[in-house]
Image (cartoon, grey):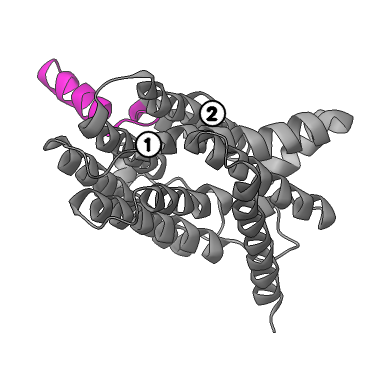
Amino acid sequence: MTIKTKGLLTVLIAYIVAITLGFISFSFTSNFSEMLQILIADIIATFAIYAFSVAYKNSSFYDPYWSVIPPVIAFYWIAMNDYIINTPTILLMVAVLFWSLRLTSNWMKTWDGLHHEDWRYIDMRKNLGSAFEIIGNVGGIHFFPTFIVFFCCMPMAQNFSSSYNWLIFLGFGLCIIGVLLEIISDKQLHAFREKNRSGTGIIETGLWNYSRHPNYYGEIIFWWGIFVFGYSFSGFNYLLLAPIAMTAMFMFASIPWIEIKILRSRPQYKNYQKRVHILFPEITILKRLFKGKNG
């Protein structure tokens, strides 16, 4: 058994334990609302993964949580609708499973084993020192993303037998487009890294010619698709804040953190930043068109 295989099996056991404990919690929260029940289960599952992270001194145990739990939440809402099989439930599960399989498989390809921890967690541990465990590990790495993803999954909570409009298909389409953008950008980045093994180059071709982070752009589109899916049932409400929060998290936290790291070893990245928008390819295209007309 390879080191990576052993690590993946250990992570699999951790998630089986976490999800099982989450489901067991339903037995003790039957008097609560369905939304609160799934939130409590989500919190308990997160604590379980956190326990494994501490036991193995590797916070990357949490990395698959982002893509593993949403399908479980989607299945829960379908179960609350007596497992009804119709157009909305089929579209929802196809979109969420397509997204989950892509993201989880991508993590499996890039994770080397129990000795490998995400560089961001290592940076956080160094910068926070003694405050890392509570502020960084519990708060920043485990529970903040858990709450963000749960919030963004809330539009899935619908009465699937009730009426909906054509926007359900728009939501599904956005989800699929988002995942396809992630797949394409991941393949382009992988091919670039294979040709530039020194790690000093900057990818500026394909989707990366229009967005500095097209993979994250696809991720954001997926979550907007989930919101539109829910909107087709219930219309505008506070859940509009969910995809907005997800977009803001990437634009003002995750992406800037990555770009600071890139600039440490590749100062030429500054020129790329001037030419290509941080996230939205539409802005890059409009800037180039405007510049061309006035050039």
Point 25% across, 58% down: residue: 85
Q: In the image, residue 224 lies at what x, y percent?
A: 32, 34
Mark 1 sits on what residue? Answer: 220
Looking at the image, can residue 106 be seen? Answer: yes
Position of 67 compared to 17: left or right? left
239 w.r.t. 28: above or below: above
Point 16% across, 35% down: residue: 167
Query: Mark 1 is on which residue type?
Result: Ile
Point 70% across, 51% down: residue: 49
Q: In the image, residue 251 lies at what x, y percent?
A: 46, 27
Considering depth in this image, is 44 or 56 the residue closer to the camera? 44
Q: Is residue 38 magenta?
A: no
Farthest front residue in view: 31
Query: Mark 2 is on which residue type?
Result: Pro
Indicate the secondary structure of the residue bearing disc 1: helix
Q: Give the magenta range.
A: 275-295
263 w.r.t. 195: above or below: above
Q: In the image, residue 247 lies at what x, y percent?
A: 42, 28
Mark 2 nearby-residue class (10 Å; few <14, some 14–19, many ≥20) = some
Farthest bottom residue in view: 1
CA–CA distance in space, label 1 to label 2: 16 Å
